Image (spheres, helix red, strand yellow):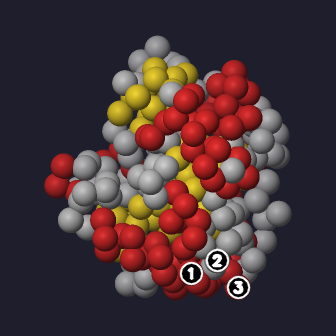
């Protein structure tokens, strides 16, 4: 279990947002924190602390008026910590290699591998063949349905798919990628505690898995350790002191 830092980019700025508020229409989101620093600043900090495996996430869709500014922020971050950060946000076979050449250790994909709400194994296998399993992280961020089950969401957490987030899904998809990234989208950015069931399912993963969403205290991190059997890595956004929160970056950087 270790800390995986993040650099979230929206409207050309490094930000922390409330995940459930993100909308493509109007490029809108509820901001928790907007940084005066650029992506390279955070990438250099993570590099100096030896925190590899973090995530750079582009939150605007391709075609947004802000996408090129997002891309420039990502380029600076990846160039500053080459091989130390993963890149997600609009990844397809058309741009995956470009992101790897920018310096990403892995590309993070979700929306591309879903069609009409269903996982498209042909698309996933195509991307795996293109970049190599070792360079692919599959984003299985999820939301809870009224009947209490979790389903994968795509398109910046705005579309519910038909793929259930469960142990069987992790087992089935583990052969196509190197890691999973899972945002508990219902609590993302709200700092109200973790989704314990999501953390428990993450703990069943046969490959490395990173949990994100709701962490606000060291108690939440210990609960994640318990739920995930000590195997689940984690990321902290809005609650981190780097982004206006109270959790110490230096303390989390020491968790191995």
Is residue 213 among the parts visible in the rendering?
Answer: no
Reading the chain from its start, which is encountered first: label 3 or label 1? Answer: 3
User: How many other residues sit within 10 Å of disc 1, few (<14), some (14-19) or many (≥20)?
Assistant: some
Q: Nearer the viewer, residue 151 or 77?
A: 77
The picture quadrant where one finds residue 234 is: bottom right
Q: What residue lies at 51% left-to-right and 28% top-to-bottom?
A: 120
Between the residue at mark 2 and the residue at mark 3, the CA separation in whole angstroms equals 12 Å
Reading the image, the residue beneath label 2 is: 82
Q: Mark 1 points at which residue?
A: 79
Tell me the residue that label 3 is attached to: 48
Q: Which of marks 3 and 1 is in front?
A: 1
Residue 17's quadrant in the figure?
Answer: bottom left
Q: Is residue 117 visible?
A: yes
212, above or below 205, in the image: below
Among numbered discs 2 and 3, the one appearing first in the sequence: 3
Q: Residue 8 carries which label?
A: none
- In which quadrant will I find the C terminus? bottom right
From the viewer's perspective, tell me whether residue 6 is left or right of residue 115.
right
Residue at the farthest top position: 147
Element on which disc 2 rests? loop
């Amino acid at each position: 279990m270790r800390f995986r830092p993040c650099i979230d980019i929206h409207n050309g700025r490094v930000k922390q947002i409330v995940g459930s508020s993100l909308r493509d229409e109007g490029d809108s989101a509820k901001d928790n924190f907007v940084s005066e620093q650029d992506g390279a600043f955070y990438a250099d900090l993570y590099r100096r602390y030896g925190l590899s495996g973090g995530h750079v996430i582009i939150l605007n869709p391709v075609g947004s008026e802000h996408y090129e500014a997002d891309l420039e922020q990502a380029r600076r971050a990846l160039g500053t910590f080459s091989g130390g950060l993963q890149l997600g946000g609009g990844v397809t076979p058309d741009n995956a290699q470009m992101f790897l050449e920018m310096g990403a250790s892995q590309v993070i994909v979700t929306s591309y591998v879903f069609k009409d709400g269903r996982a498209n194994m042909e698309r996933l296998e195509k991307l795996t063949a293109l970049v190599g399993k070792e360079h692919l992280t599959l984003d299985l961020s999820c939301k809870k349905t009224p009947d209490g089950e979790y389903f994968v969401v795509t398109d910046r957490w705005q579309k519910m798919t038909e793929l259930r987030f469960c142990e069987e899904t992790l087992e089935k998809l583990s052969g196509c990628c190197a890691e999973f990234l899972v945002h508990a989208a219902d609590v993302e950015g709200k700092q109200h505690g973790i989704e314990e069931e999501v953390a428990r399912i993450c703990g069943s993963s046969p490959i490395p898995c990173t949990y994100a969403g709701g962490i606000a205290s060291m108690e939440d991190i210990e609960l994640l350790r318990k739920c995930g059997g000590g195997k689940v890595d984690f990321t902290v956004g809005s609650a981190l002191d780097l982004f206006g929160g109270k959790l110490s970056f230096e303390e989390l950087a020491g968790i191995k």
